[in-house]
Amino acid sequence: MGQSHPEPIHCRLMQKYSASSILRHALSHHRKWPPLWRNPEPKPSYDVVIIGGGGHGLATAYFLASKYGLRNVAVLEKGWLGGGNSGRNTQATRSNYFYPTSTRFYDYSLRLYETLGRDLNFNVMLSQRGVVSLVSNPHELELTRRWANAIYLNGVDAQMLSVAEIKRLMPRLNFQGRLPIIGGFIQKRGGISRHDAVNWGFARAASALGVDIIQNCEVKAFEMNGNRVVGVSTTRGSIGAERFAMAVAGHSSELARLAGFRLPITSMALSWSSAGAPMFTTPIRSAAAWRTPRRCSRHCSSYFRVSAGCG
């Protein structure tokens, strides 16, 4: 577990990104860059098959290969990589959660993000510009103080903000809206990361380690031996494996149904909006009660969310 393994030929052939390689390719007008990942035909069987080519599926494949030496792995994606939930998320990268278990989990994830670009040799566009949570009434302000103090006691950075401090941080923010802004708090290590870049970075690194990434390969049915899954029927043929994993976000319950079991979850669509020009430099959240879905803007670098205030 976690021991080093010999590099496969794919990894040794992968061209490293660097300032010198960018300058060298500039001489050919950047027309000779190799593809980011291989495009293999699916093999009849693998040690592990991961269904879903988004952030979770690609990260699982990468860590299986890089940390545990499991390289006879396939990632099956019914469309293109990152074209599902990973391409529609809020981009927020943070660990400002109330409960200790959540704090430890998400802060470990945030620490991974802080070195992910170097680990993958790919710019995941992590920008730790801070995540601000705003409040609009005294009740929310008290809840937010408890929230920030709990995060701080759990070992994660959190700082309460006055209205004057918020104005200095985000001078373009409208303080005369329907809901007044009376304070907030910031996690300065939080921020955003580009979801497409995260997907592509994981895909490139996993492919270099020997993982087969197979796009346009939709799973239509599971092949069973008793109560054990031994293969999947896909739009690109039958594929067997010793182990299967699902990383399909909102399609999890539907895919589980095809496999013959029921997941105790309900998938719900969340709405988000985008604007045409930059407005804020810091992701923003609201600490109001759960009344509407979260909203974010990938173009504005802003993140609006309606929450109960305690993560």
Image: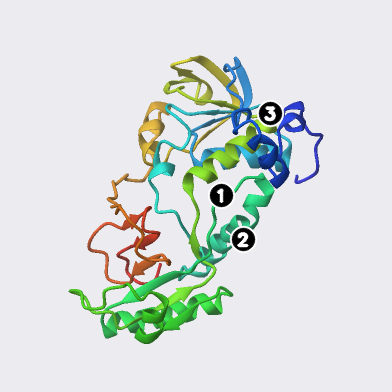
Front of the two marks 2 and 1: 1
Q: Amino acid at mark 2?
A: Arg
| Residue, far front | 27
Front of the two marks 1 and 3: 1
Q: Can you say whether 67 is above or below 102 in the image?
A: above
Quarter of the rendering occupied by the N terminus: top right
Residue 277's quadrant in the figure?
Answer: bottom left
The answer to which of 41 and 262 lies nearer the viewer is 41
Task: Name the residue located 60 percent from the left edge and 14 percent from the top edge.
Answer: 44
Q: Are marks 2 and 3 in contact (CB under 8 Å)?
A: no
C-alpha span from label 1 to label 3: 21 Å
First of labels 2, 1 by sequence position: 2
- x, y percent for residue 278: 36, 59
First of labels 2, 3 by sequence position: 2
C-alpha span from label 2 to label 3: 26 Å
Q: Can you say whether 263 is above or below 230 in the image?
A: below
Task: Name the residue located 70 percent from the left edge and 45 percent from the top edge.
Answer: 18
- Residue under label 3, please give it: 210
Residue 260's quadrant in the figure?
Answer: top left
Q: Are marks 2 and 1 in contact (CB under 8 Å)?
A: no
- x, y percent for residue 311: 41, 67
SS for callout 1? loop
| Residue, far left | 178
SS for callout 3? loop
The answer to which of 12 and 224 lies nearer the viewer is 12
- Residue under label 2, please give it: 111
- Residue under label 1, please give it: 124
Q: Are marks 1 and 3 in contact (CB under 8 Å)?
A: no
- x, y percent for residue 298: 38, 53
Q: Amino acid at mark 3?
A: Gly
